[in-house]
Image (cartoon, helix red, strand yellow):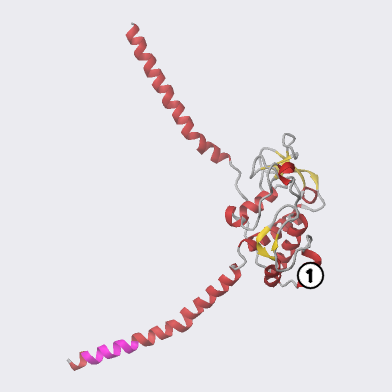
Amino acid sequence: MSRRLSETMNKTMKTAALVLAGLLLAAPAVQAEEEVQTLEFSPSSNPAALQRGARDFMAYCSGCHSLKYLRYNRLGADLGISEDLLKQNLIFNGAKVGEPITTALPAQAEQWFGRVPPDLTLETKARGAEWVYSYLMGFYLDGSRPMGVNNLFLPGVSMPAVLGELQGWQVKEEGKGEHGEGLPLKLAVPGSMTPEEYKAFVSDLTSFMAYAAEPVASDRVSTGIKVMFYLIFLLTPLTWFLKKEFWRDVHKDEEHH
């Protein structure tokens, strides 16, 4: 009797172990299914949009975040902004136009936010423009957080909702939020911008950050178009004439034989 009981307990323990292992393996999959999908977004290359994005980055982001791999004069040359306008409207820390875009944030930043705000030059390359756009749309009120807000795409975020006065204050709820662009968020307190105005604002800002991550992108596209033009309209006819010349000699040799 005791032997049967022992065998039964062993089988039960093995079954329980298998079930537990299955749950542990399934946990990441369940968690992945619960993740909020990023919003669709494609960066603009329109110069006016990038100029607005540069203005807004300097006004709302550069106080804490740098773009240390981008220089003011390169930004001005690419976006059609003169040095005088750079100095008057985009340089707030006394930097020279040939210097990288740095922040004037005091050394106490880590004490204030728990960490030093990161440089954002390559943020859209690292995370993707869709993620950055979604992140800026995804802040909501959370009384359990030190800054009073949280973010759908970066839970436990240390950054305050710097754009909250523009967007308004959102609350998290089950289902799709009317003003959250498909996110489970609802606008509880309106901001100074309408949802559409804020969406356009974030679009310009994210587009500028995408430009900052790869300023040569437009040059690369232009070079690619020129190369394709060369291959299609210049190299193709030359190749055809070479082929015709080669086969003409081959046909002559065949006739002689």
The three-letter amino acid code for the residue at tag 1 is Leu
Q: Which residue lies furthest to the front in this view?
A: 107
Residue 88, position in %: x, y?
A: 81, 67
Is residue 40 at least partly visible in the picture?
no
> Would you name the residue on which mark 1 appears?
85
Q: Is residue 113 above or below residue 1?
A: below
Quadrant for the N terminus, please.
top left
Q: In this view, does 52 lie above or below 127?
A: below
Label 1 Cα neighbours within 10 Å, binned few <14 / some 14-19 / many ≥20: few
Q: In this view, does 159 lie above or below 256?
A: above
Is residue 116 shown left or right of residue 128?
right
Is residue 210 shown left or right of residue 165?
left
Q: Is residue 126 above or below residue 218?
A: above
Q: How many labels does the image show?
A: 1
- Main SS, magenta region, reads helix
Is residue 192 shown left or right of residue 20?
right
Residue 167, position in %: x, y?
A: 77, 50
Is residue 182 at least partly visible in the picture?
yes
Q: What kind of element bears circle 1?
A: helix
The quarter holding residue 43 reads bottom right
Which residue occupies the foreground of this view, 219 or 251?
219
Residue at point 77%, 64% (across, down): 90
Quadrant for the C terminus, please.
bottom left
Q: Which residue lies furthest to the left in this view?
A: 257
Residue 245, position in %: x, y?
A: 33, 89
The quarter holding residue 207 reads bottom right
Residue 225, position in %: x, y?
A: 54, 75
130 part of magenta stretch: no
Q: Which residue lies furthest to the top in this view?
A: 1
Q: Which contiguous range is marked in magenta? A: 244-253
